Amino acid sequence: MKFFIDTANLDQIAEGKELGILDGVTTNPSLMAKEGISGRDNILAHYKKICDLVDGDVSAEVISTDFQGMKDELLELKEIAPNIVIKIPMIKDGIKALSFCRDNGIPTNCTLIFSAGQALIAAKAGATYISPFIGRIDDITWDGVELVRQIAEMYAIQMFDTEILAASIRNSNHIVQAATAGADVVTCPLAPILGLLKHPLTDIGLEKFLADHHKANA
Ligand code: E4P
């Protein structure tokens, strides 16, 4: 399973990269705004910095909601770097944009997926990745992990190549659950990734090993 980091913060991306387990980055307009990045030129320049920092796929989201606008934007975004993936919302014109990208060999990430039907049509339109939002589904008391499981089963039966990129991850358990449900990728902030490392018995065990070593070597 691939690990993407879900942030536009360069320090956090660099810290994730140092672990040696980072396969890519996802961003969205809210994450860019959170970093205070505004204006087309600054946004493009920031994506370039992210692409220079990581070897893997970097999702850059279009803002337009009409096909022509999306097409103009994605053609500009794809020139930033070879590892740019165009993030396209799950709307009618988004399907047209996904099909255009499929026909022109441009990798895509279809975002804001909340149902198996949306995942089906995005795969049919040739999306490279689809992003079901686990946390936001859980927020309304539905089951985000169960949606990932359903999509994984459907894609296996239909032999779609589209990768399931579990997004809107809120905690470390979501990562494990998404992996178990068949996600190909998880994207999340650094904290849930670091949370995977933690276990109190590891800390207690290490403390004892080191104490015994120091006693024997005093
Ligand atoms: C996915 O690509 C989105 O950027 C992100 O995971 C959304 O997460 P949120 O629901 O925490 O905003």
Image: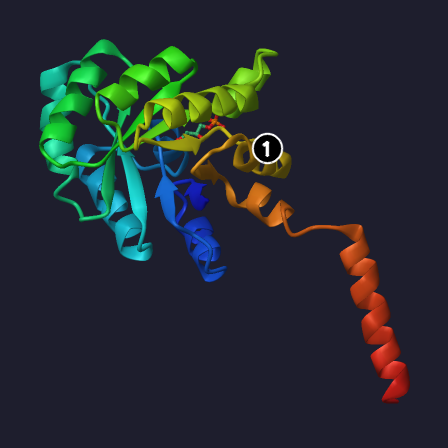
Question: 67 or 181: which is nearer to us?
Answer: 181
Question: Is residue 69 rendered to the left or right of residue 20?
Answer: left
Residue 31 position, x and y percent, is: 39, 33
- From the top left corner, tell me how far across and down residue 24 is, in percent: 36, 47
Picture coordinates of residue 82, whole percent (x, y): 18, 48
- Which residue: 22% across, 10% down? 92
Q: Secondary structure at mark 1?
A: helix
Q: Nearer the viewer, residue 48 or 130?
A: 130
Q: Nearer the viewer, residue 162 or 19?
A: 162
* Residue at the spot 18% in from the left edge and 48% down from the top edge: 81
Above or below residue 188? Residue 123 is above
Left or right of residue 110, residue 210 in this image: right
Outermost residue on the front side: it is 157
Left or right relative to 166: residue 93:
left
Question: Residue sitting at 47 percent across and 53 percent down?
Answer: 16
Residue 89 seen in the figure: no
Q: Is residue 151 above or below residue 32?
A: above
Is 69 rendered above or below residue 87?
A: above
**Residue shown at 48%/20% (left/top)?**
150
Q: Residue beneath label 1, please?
A: 177
The image quadrant where one finds ligand 1 is top left
Residue found farthest to the bottom: 218
Q: Quadrant of the C terminus?
A: bottom right
Q: Quadrant of residue 175?
A: top right
Structural crowding at the residue carrying mark 1, measured as other residues with C-alpha within 10 Å and reported as few (<14), some (14–19) or many (≥20)? some
| Cβ of mark 1 under 8 A from ligand 1 | no
Amino acid type, residue under disc 1 in the picture: Gln
Residue 112 can be seen, yes or no: yes
